Amino acid sequence: MRAYLATNLIGAVAFDSDGKVIEYALFPKKPEQIVERLNTIEAGKVTDEETSIIAKLKIHNLLEVMCERPMPGIEGISIVVKPDHIGTRMLKTQYRKLAIQFKWASSQADLNAILSKIQILKTKEQLKVEKRDRILMQAVASADELDRSINALTEHLREWYGLHFPEMDRSIKSNDKYVEIVAMYGDRKEIDVKELRKAVTKSAGMPFAPHDIAIIKTLSKSIMQLAYARKELGIYIDETARDVIPNMCAIAEPILAARLVLLAGGLEKISRLPSSTVQLLGAEKALFRHLKGEGKSPKYGALFAHSAVQNAPQEKRGKVARLIAAKLSIASRVDYFSKVDKTEELKKDFQKSLKAI
């Protein structure tokens, strides 16, 4: 004999092959607790009521239980996973009648009131997530703007100060160090840096007046302030991403995970995208060129920055990017729909799949 187990907002119900109720375990009637259980189900986990009902089914000498998703089995009962079966269809169409029959709700009006409260709570949860992901998106966009500004201003500073001390541009490759030296010393004659001492005395650069030095030092100090703001913003993005999209951060570095959310247009949107689209986020221009017959099909977009793609052999980078995109698609859905922390499980699964490539 086989039972068909299904679960929805009233609880877990087991039916026989004729659609008759065998056993049931109802959820508490409190909307907050119902939402918690619905979130557990959306995350692919098992509720206490479902575990309880499987144990009860053993009394009925059942050999097999058909379930919507994987469940912990018990000795003597085989668990078969099938998302759509007679039990799911019966509960979907009959749950209003069953709620009254089981005395879970006193009337249809009572049931409607509970449904309304559940919907309000679920909507509030989604709004909280959506607002937080908007904050994250703005932070990433601001970081990108700061990067562009810092790079552009540093380039101008090098060209400007190069008129005064051209040799320094060749000797100091680090932009951060270059800006720091200009901010600290200003006039080349004041510079006391080991690798520049000889160049200072033989420089072919033009002399700068005191007011020239003053304004260029002001510019370099402003660049340093922007660099500090960018560093702090990076820390903020890392912390916020781990809070808003923890499961995505288990697969990709926080800044990359956050950037993908930005490129997709939000957490909800990326959670609904197929993995093939996630794989090419950030490669839209290359994809359009390919569609016009002007280039090869891109294998990845922003995912090129992922450490696993960077470390993979050239011929395997496409496969690695495809794997990352698939895992990120799953993680984004967990982050958006259930908000359950499955980071450790996702990490282990990702690393196992990565080694198999």
Image (tube, rainbow, N blue to C red):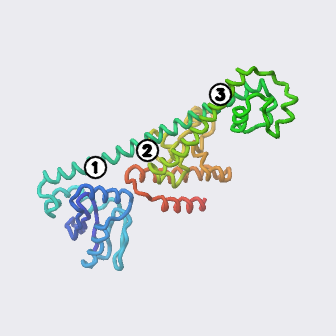
Residue 151 relative to residue 133: left or right: right
The amino acid marked with disc number 3 is Thr
The one nearer the camera, 80 or 232, is: 232
Residue 174 placement (x, y as % from top left): 72, 39
Instruction: Locate the N terminus by quadrant.
Output: bottom left
Residue 335 relative to residue 325: left or right: left
Image-quadrant location for residue 36: bottom left
The residues tagged by marks 2 and 1 sit, at their Cα atoms, a distance apart of: 19 Å
The amino acid marked with disc number 2 is Leu
Lower sequence index among marks 3 and 2: 3
The residue labelled by disc 2 is: 267
Q: Which residue is drawn at 65% across and 29% down?
A: 153
Reply above or below: 205 against 232: above
Mark in the foreground, 2 or 1: 1
The residue labelled by disc 1 is: 121
Q: Residue at x 21, y 55 (%)?
A: 93
Residues under numbered marks 2 and 1 in contact, where contact means CB atoms less than 8 Å apart: no
Would residue 149 be visible to someone looking at this image? yes
The residue labelled by disc 3 is: 218
Under circle 3, the secondary element is helix
Under circle 2, the secondary element is helix
Lower sequence index among marks 2 and 1: 1
Lower sequence index among marks 1 and 3: 1
The residues tagged by marks 3 and 2 sit, at their Cα atoms, a distance apart of: 41 Å
Residues under numbered marks 3 and 2 in contact, where contact means CB atoms less than 8 Å apart: no
How many marks are shown on the rendered structure?
Answer: 3
Mark in the foreground, 1 or 3: 3
Residue 318 placement (x, y as % from top left): 61, 49
Under circle 1, the secondary element is helix
Q: Residues within 10 Å of mark 1 (few under 14, many from 20)?
A: some
